[in-house]
């Protein structure tokens, strides 16, 4: 079962990732978000940052629908995300290996080709400090 600490560890292990200051987690590559905490909107009150649910970039509507229909216990969406290539992921419903795959795929779709090539060629994977926002 995955959790927010797993998301943080896996996202920061990818090249050129920056963590944005937030009440939960929010990760970007090349100024593009690829995984962040779900800001649940509640009628009549302020939004609640849910660190047990990740918003994940999936690339396109076809991929989104495949995930939603194929694994409704894991993925869901809300009307606020209609038309956007994003799904919500219940972290407790996936193991760390699956979470790594999902986060890496989201990163690949948002990263410039040169960074994807670096990852594929192992150029940056040898630097454990790469991607830490405090550098």
Image: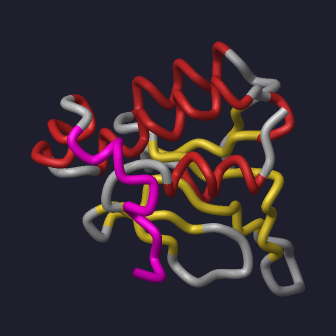
In the rendered view, would you say 74 is above or below 131?
above
Q: Give the extent of the magenta segment.
A: 123-135
Give the residue drawn at x 76%, y 51%: 53
Out of 70 and 126, give the one closest to the viewer. Answer: 126
Out of 132 and 54, give the one closest to the viewer. Answer: 132
Horizontal side of 84 relative to 6 (left or right) equals left
Horizontal side of 22 relative to 92 (left or right) equals left
Residue occupying the far top of the picture: 70
For the C terminus, which image quadrant?
A: bottom left
Give the residue drawn at x 62%, y 52%: 9
Horizontal side of 38 relative to 18 (left or right) equals right
Picture quarter containing residue 105?
Answer: top left
Give the residue drawn at x 24%, y 29%: 120
Residue 133: percent from left, percent from top: 45, 77
Picture quarter containing residue 60?
Answer: top left
> Does 39 appear in magenta?
no
Horizontal side of 53 relative to 62 (left or right) equals right
Residue 35: percent from left, percent from top: 53, 54
């Amino acid at each position: 079962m995955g959790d927010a600490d797993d998301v943080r560890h896996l996202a920061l292990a990818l090249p050129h990732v920056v963590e944005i200051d937030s009440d939960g987690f929010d990760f970007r590559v090349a100024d593009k978000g690829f995984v962040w905490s779900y800001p649940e909107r509640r009628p009549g009150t302020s939004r609640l940052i849910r660190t047990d649910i990740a918003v994940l970039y999936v690339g396109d509507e076809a991929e989104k629908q495949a995930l939603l229909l194929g694994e409704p216990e894991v993925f869901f969406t809300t009307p606020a995300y209609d038309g956007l290539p994003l799904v919500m992921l219940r972290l407790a419903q996936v193991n760390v290996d699956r979470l790594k795959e999902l986060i890496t795929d989201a990163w690949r779709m948002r990263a410039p080709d040169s960074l994807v090539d670096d990852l594929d060629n192992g150029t940056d994977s040898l630097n454990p400090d790469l991607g830490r926002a405090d550098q």
